[in-house]
Amino acid sequence: MAPLVLTECRQLWRLRGLLAVLTRRELGARFAGSAGGLLWVWLPPLLTVAAYYLVFDVVFGMRLGSAAPTARVGTYLIAGMLAWMAFADAVQRGMMSLLDAGAMLQKNPLPPGLFPARAVLASGVVFAPLLLLLVALYGGAHHFGWGVLAVPALIVLQGALAFLLAYLLAIMAAALRDVVQVVGVLLSLGVFLSPVLFPVTLFPQAWRWLLWLNPMTGPILGYQSALLQGAWPPWSVWVAMAAWLALLAALLSLALARSRDQLRDWL
C-alpha cells in the first residue's frame, strides 16, 4: 500500500476504541426509535434473498446450463447479489460519510478516515453474518468442501476494497458534489457488469475483460466458487483483488496528499 494509506491505517488502529464506539453509534442511528431494533437492519437483505429463492427456484424452477457453478438460478443469484449489496451499501454510505460529518470535522481535529471506516464497518456488521450464514445453508450441497474456508478471507478483502474506494470517493465528493450522483448511477449499473446475474461463461469471450474493470468481479467469483462448489477460489480471483487493492491504495494516497490542506474547507 502507498505510504499515506499505511499511515491512515496505523492511525485507525491506534484509535480502534473510538472507531468501535462510532460504529456502534452508526448502527444505533439506523434503527433509532424503532421497536424492531437491529431486526430492521437485517430484514431487507434477508427478504431479498428469500424472494430470489422463492421466485426463481420454487415458483419458476429456473435452471442454468452445465457450465454454471450451480443449476439453480435463485441459489446462484443469492451468492453474488448478497455480496454486491454489501459492497454497494458500504461504498455508498462511506462516500457520504465525510459530508455527513463535516460539522464535526470542522470543530474537532479527528482523522477524516474514521468516518469512512465507521460506515464500512457498520455495513460489515450487517452483511458479514449473512454471508457466513450462506456457508451453513450451501455447505450441505457439496459436503462442506474445504473451499468454504476462503469465505472469511473474501469478506475481509471485500471490506478493504470497500474502505479504500469509499474513502477515495468521500474525498472526491467533498470536492465535487456531483460525484455522489455519478457513483449512485454506477453502483446501480455495476451489477450488470459483473458475474452476479449471469455466469462468466455466458458473457462473450472477447469482452470478458470488461468484467474485471469491476472491483467486485474477483470477490463475487470467489464467493461463487467457495459457496456453490466448495472449491478454493482460483488464483485469478486473488490476483484481481490484490491488483484492485494496490490501485485503490495508490489513488487514495494521491487524493490524501492533494486534499490534506483543503478537505475541511470543502466540507
Image: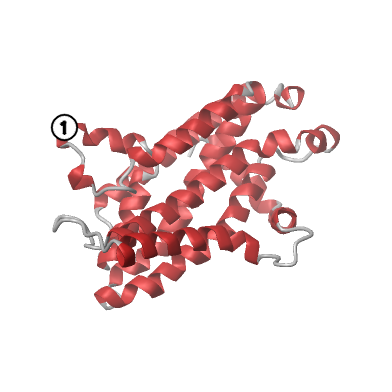
Residue ID at (38%, 65%): 54
Extreme residue in the right direction: 107
Could you tell me if residue 263 is visible in this image? yes
Q: Above or below — where is 149 with respect to 187?
A: below
Give x and y (percent) for residue 66. 13, 58
Question: Looking at the image, is 140 positioned above or below residue 254?
Answer: below
Q: Report the residue marked by disc 1.
A: 206
Q: How many dots with numbers? A: 1
Instruction: From this view, report whether residue 82 is shown above or below residue 250.
Output: below
Q: Which residue is at the front of the view, 168 or 6? A: 168
Question: Going by the image, does 204 lie left or right of 139?
Answer: left
Q: Is residue 227 visible?
A: no
Q: Which x, y percent locates residue 160?
A: 50, 48
Label 1 sits on what residue type?
Ala
| 247 lies left or right of 29 | left
Q: Residue at x 56, y 32 (%)?
A: 169
Q: Which quadrant would residue 137 be assigned to in this image?
A: bottom left
160 to the left or right of 28: left
Which residue of the protein is positioned furthest toward the front in this rendering?
59
Q: Residue 145 or 65: which is nearer the viewer?
A: 65
Residue at the image position 54 percent from the left and 31 percent from the top: 253
**Residue 116 found in image quarter:** top right
Q: Nearer the viewer, residue 54 or 171?
A: 54
Which residue is more in the foreground, 77 or 129? Answer: 77
**37 vs 185: above or below:** below
List x then y, in percent, for residue 133: 45, 70
Helix, strand or loop under label 1: helix
